[in-house]
Amino acid sequence: MLIKRYSGNPILTKEDVPYSVSTVHNAAVTKYNGKYLMIFRSHKKNGRSILGKAESSDGYNFKVDTMPFMVPSTEGYFKDYEEYGIEDPRITFFDGEYLITYSAYSKYGVRIGLAKTSDFKTVTRISMITQADHRNVVIFPEKFNGLYARLDRPHSEISPWSIWISFSPDLKYWGESKLLIKPLNYHWDEMKIGPGAPPIKTTRGWLIIYHGVFSTMSGGIYRLGTALLDLTDPSRVIAVGDDWILQPEEVFEITGYVHNVVFTCAAVPEPDGSVKIYWGGADTVMCVGTANIENLVDSCLNNSRPAI
Ligand code: BMA
């Protein structure tokens, strides 16, 4: 088994939140000031989402702030595009700042917002960095040829829910987009795929943990898989693992707000070569597990499926 589930899962539930929410899931996690900092998504009881903050000294036991960290904007440009809620944050540490991407829902569709913070007390919105029908943007922690890079997931009828890469000189304006990985027919990820955790640098390439969905008669099943991108040119796919690395198995992954979901927005590499992978269980609770990074890379390289 590549991922060892933490025996104390779920690590965070709505009972741990001091304000009224009905779920705690799809969280970003990063290290900040020697601690683990988590920004998690919660459904409010009107069905729309907000982001909360929790802190931990060991990555397993989290304490939630008394107030939400980010709620839909009530002013200016952002207000129109966040009206239906903000979801699924991802954090990348870059040049002393934490870049936070999140899905912004409104009557205009789903777009990706970019915000930043350096202290997790105040947060500044920078820009909406996609048009509608994009989700799951993860920013690389390094530049390539002077450009920021991100993985994203536009959706269209001809090329549904696939993983692309885009580049930017300033984090606001993105281009040079290229399709990297498509869902594969009659495969665990055949319906849709999307970037999960921000890319992890390894000696053999950028390790990508992504989600894939298989449609069944009782709804979709969300699982996690791996891919490896070239270290100096991440628009080159080295491999996409054939097998999933995690699927819903615990009761709190199988049933909940949305049944049969494991969905990741965060993986925190540790100095000992392990990685803590965080995932939302059934869109209801937060879970964590550990894996060895080299083992994930080996499994991706040794048993691959075509990228496109
Ligand atoms: C996706 C997103 C995720 C969610 C998943 C399963 O489309 O909405 O936030 O975890 O569906 O419901």
Image (spheres, rainbow, N blue to C red):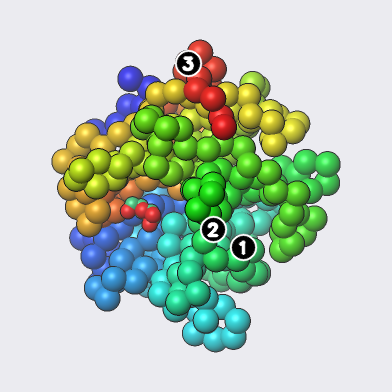
Q: For the residue labelled by badge 1, is the local secondary structure a helix, a strand or a loop? A: loop
Residue 242 appears in the figure = yes
Furthest toward the front, the residue is 158
Considering depth in this image, is 112 or 212 the residue closer to the camera?
Answer: 212
Which residue is denoted by mark 3 in the rendering?
303
Does 127 appear above or below 208? below
Determine crowd level at label 2: few under 14, some 14-19, many 20+ residues with C-alpha closer than 10 A: many
Give the residue displayed 65% in from the left and 69% down from the top: 126
Q: Is mark 1 within 8 Å of ligand 1?
A: no
Which residue is denoted by mark 1 in the rendering?
130
Labelled disc at residue 134: 2
Q: Earlier in the sequence, mark 3 or mark 1?
A: 1
Q: Give the residue type that dot 2 points to.
A: His
Labelled disc at residue 276: none
Q: Give the residue type that dot 1 points to.
A: Thr
**Disc 3 to disc 1, C-alpha distance:** 34 Å
Q: Earlier in the sequence, mark 3 or mark 2?
A: 2
Residue 13 image offset from top left, x and y in percent: 25, 55
Image quadrant where one finds the C terminus: top right
Considering depth in this image, is 67 or 220 the residue closer to the camera?
Answer: 220
